[in-house]
């Protein structure tokens, strides 16, 4: 059909007026072709407009018709249209059922592995944050001053000196493996190089771990460390919210487990109707009825054998040429 239109409307046509028309011949294979175009146009229209698009569709072109189906279609059998519609609908329902079963398996896997592991991780994070908050409270920062920092076994009482020593330690670090740097406000400091981000990091280790990205300013790095410690209560609140969310999802998943496929009845009814149509249209391979009159007729092979008995076999001569 695209070829028919292309010969009329493509470039190079010198006619001032053309008529583009479509036609279909009743009782021919055109019915299946137009049904294919109709289904494809439905999906195209959903994508090109703002209507709710279907996220998946079956490719109708890959549905092969047997010779019996083509014969029934060309004969104009009205049941073939219903059968083709049921083929598409049953295939769609089977895909939905397979997706429903996959979701059931994924939910079972989450109940057995994901939720217990995540709940345990968030619970441990909550406990570590609570312990680190107590450590921060026991080692407060001095207002308008500096509480001191231990770097590589030496104590520094000035913020600028401590910041410069951190930058000096960064220059001495040659690989990405974390190295012990010192202590600050009750937390162990580890210095490491993040090759992916191309920057140095300090990890404050107490009951939990708190990572801080370093910059090039000596005083600014100390401020970043203090900000990371002051943000531990916010991390605690996020962990509690995440734990509550996990418990809610776990409970909802338990209620969804074991639910049957909601369109199971429709799939069963349409499958039974499709089987009835297959039987009515004689889609299965069938053998021709046996005719007793054919038994009296001699076979072609037997006739050839009987004639070959009266033919004299030809002699074969061995002709050879000798070169002297």
Image (tube, rainbow, N blue to C red):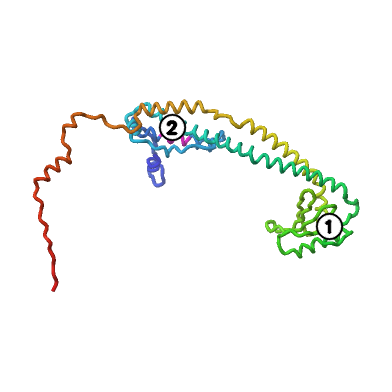
| Point 64% across, 32% down: residue | 254
Q: Earlier in the sequence, mark 1 or mark 2?
A: 2
Q: Which residue is mark 2?
A: 87
- Residue 289, image x and y in percent? 26, 29
The residue tagged with tag 1: helix, strand or loop?
helix
| Point 56% across, 29% down: residue | 260
User: Taking 27 as reference, is 139 left or right?
Assistant: right
The prevailing secondary structure element of the residues shown in magenta is: helix
Of 123 and 184, which appears nearest the observer?
123
Check the image and report above or below for 198 versus 253: below
Q: Which residue is mark 1?
A: 219
**Residue 68: quarter of image:** top left
| Point 42% across, 39% down: residue | 62
Check the image and report above or below for 217 versus 235: below
Q: Is residue 26 visible?
A: no
Q: Are marks 1 and 2 in contact (CB under 8 Å)?
A: no
Label 2 environment density (alpha carbons within 10 Å; few <14, some 14–19, many ≥20):
some
User: Taking 74 as reference, is 204 left or right?
Assistant: right
User: Taking 29 as reference, is 319 left or right?
Assistant: left
Task: Tell me the mark number nearer the camera, choosing from 1 and 2.
Answer: 2
Label 1 environment density (alpha carbons within 10 Å; few <14, some 14–19, many ≥20):
some
Q: Which residues are magenta?
A: 34-41
């Amino acid at each position: 059909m695209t070829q028919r239109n292309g010969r009329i409307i493509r470039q190079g046509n010198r006619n001032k007026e053309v008529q583009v028309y479509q036609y279909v011949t009743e009782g021919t294979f055109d019915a299946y072709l137009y049904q294919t175009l109709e289904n494809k146009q439905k999906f195209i229209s959903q994508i090109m407009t703002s209507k709710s698009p279907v996220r998946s569709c079956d490719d109708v072109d890959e549905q092969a018709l047997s010779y019996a189906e083509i014969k029934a279609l060309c004969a104009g059998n009205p049941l073939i249209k219903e059968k083709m519609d049921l083929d598409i609908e049953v295939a769609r329902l089977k895909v939905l059922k397979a997706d429903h079963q996959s979701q059931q398996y994924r939910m079972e896997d989450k109940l057995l592995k994901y939720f217990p592991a995540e709940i345990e991780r968030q619970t441990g994070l909550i406990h570590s944050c609570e312990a680190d908050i107590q450590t921060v409270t026991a080692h407060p920062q001095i207002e308008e001053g500096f509480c001191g920092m231990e770097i590589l076994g030496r104590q520094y009482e000035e913020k600028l000196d401590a910041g410069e020593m951190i930058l000096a330690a960064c220059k001495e670090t040659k690989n990405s493996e974390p190295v012990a740097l010192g202590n600050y406000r009750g937390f162990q400091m580890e210095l490491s190089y993040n090759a992916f981000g191309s920057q140095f990091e300090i990890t404050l280790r107490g009951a939990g771990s708190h990572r801080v990205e370093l910059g090039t300013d000596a005083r600014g790095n100390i401020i970043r460390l203090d900000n990371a410690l002051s943000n531990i209560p916010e991390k605690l609140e996020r962990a509690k919210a995440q734990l509550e969310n996990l418990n809610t999802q776990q409970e909802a998943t338990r209620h969804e487990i074991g639910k049957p496929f909601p369109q199971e009845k429709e799939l069963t009814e349409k499958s039974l109707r499709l089987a009835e149509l297959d039987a009515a249209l004689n889609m299965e391979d069938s053998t021709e009825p046996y005719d007793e009159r054919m038994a009296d007729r001699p076979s072609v092979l037997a006739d050839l054998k009987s004639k070959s008995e009266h033919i004299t076999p030809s002699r074969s001569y061995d002709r050879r040429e000798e070169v002297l």
